[in-house]
Image (cartoon, rainbow, N blue to C red):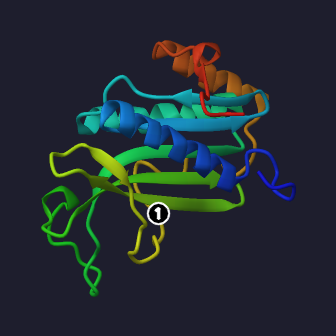
Amino acid sequence: MSEDQPPDSPDELLARAEDFACFSMRTRGKVPPGLIAVGPSGSIFFAPSTMDDVRTKDNFANMARLICIAHGATAAVLIIEAWMAVVAGDGSLDQPPSEALNRREVVMLTCETRSGVRQKILPIIRTGVGGFWAFGDYDGPPAGSLQGRFTQFLLPKMPSKALQDHARRLLAAMGINTNDLRRDPFAN
């Protein structure tokens, strides 16, 4: 980290998320979805137990938002392995990315802070037999405006203590104790 970068800057958070993605690809052959949230008490890591249908994807997104509120997060990085297809020049997408002929397997890293969003796309390069080889360089168009279930995890302003407590109670009702969340394994 350079001296002019604050701790937990978007660049540092994206680097930590990339380390996690690389470690996961090398040891498991895939990247589990995850969230790194940074707040006053440090950084935590959250990964859902499963994310294999629309309901569990929605649940992960909602839990991630609640965790950011409960933790008083000032920054959050979402880590997701996905299929990506580049949209045609007219802005249309004929079919889902997972079915597109020009699809690419990627890991998406999206870092949100209250001052903006940074994104990094890591194309997955596999060996001839399907194992992980490395991450390539993304050479596509820059990401446009981000929309959807996996965006806007942070509130525009720091949540009040009452709102943080309410988020903790909601998480507890879902079986998540914010004190039990794992500390970010890639934090310094």
Instruction: Determine the residue positioned at 61% across, 53% down.
Output: 112
Q: Position of residue 57 (x, y in %)?
A: 33, 38
4 left or right of 112 in image:
right
Q: Which percent across, then down, holds residue 101?
A: 12, 68
Q: Residues within 10 Å of mark 1 (few under 14, many from 20)?
A: few
Instruction: Tell me: residue 35, above or below residue 148.
Output: above
Identify the secondary structure beneath mark 1.
loop
The residue identified by callout 1 is 146
Residue 103 spot, x, y in % from top left: 21, 64
The residue depicted at 26 percent of the width and 39 percent of the height is: 54
Q: Is residue 7 visible?
A: yes
**Which corner quadrant holds the C terminus?**
top right
Asked if residue 185 is positioned above or below residue 54 in the image, the reply reads: above
Tell me, yes or no, if residue 154 can be seen here: no
Q: Is residue 42 left or right of residue 178?
A: right
Give the residue displayed 37% in from the left and 39% down from the top: 25
In the figure, residue 148 lies in which quadrant?
Answer: bottom left
Q: Is residue 133 above or below residue 163?
A: below
Type of the residue with mark 1: Leu
Side of 9 where 94 appears, left or right: left
Is 174 placed left or right of 76 in the picture?
left
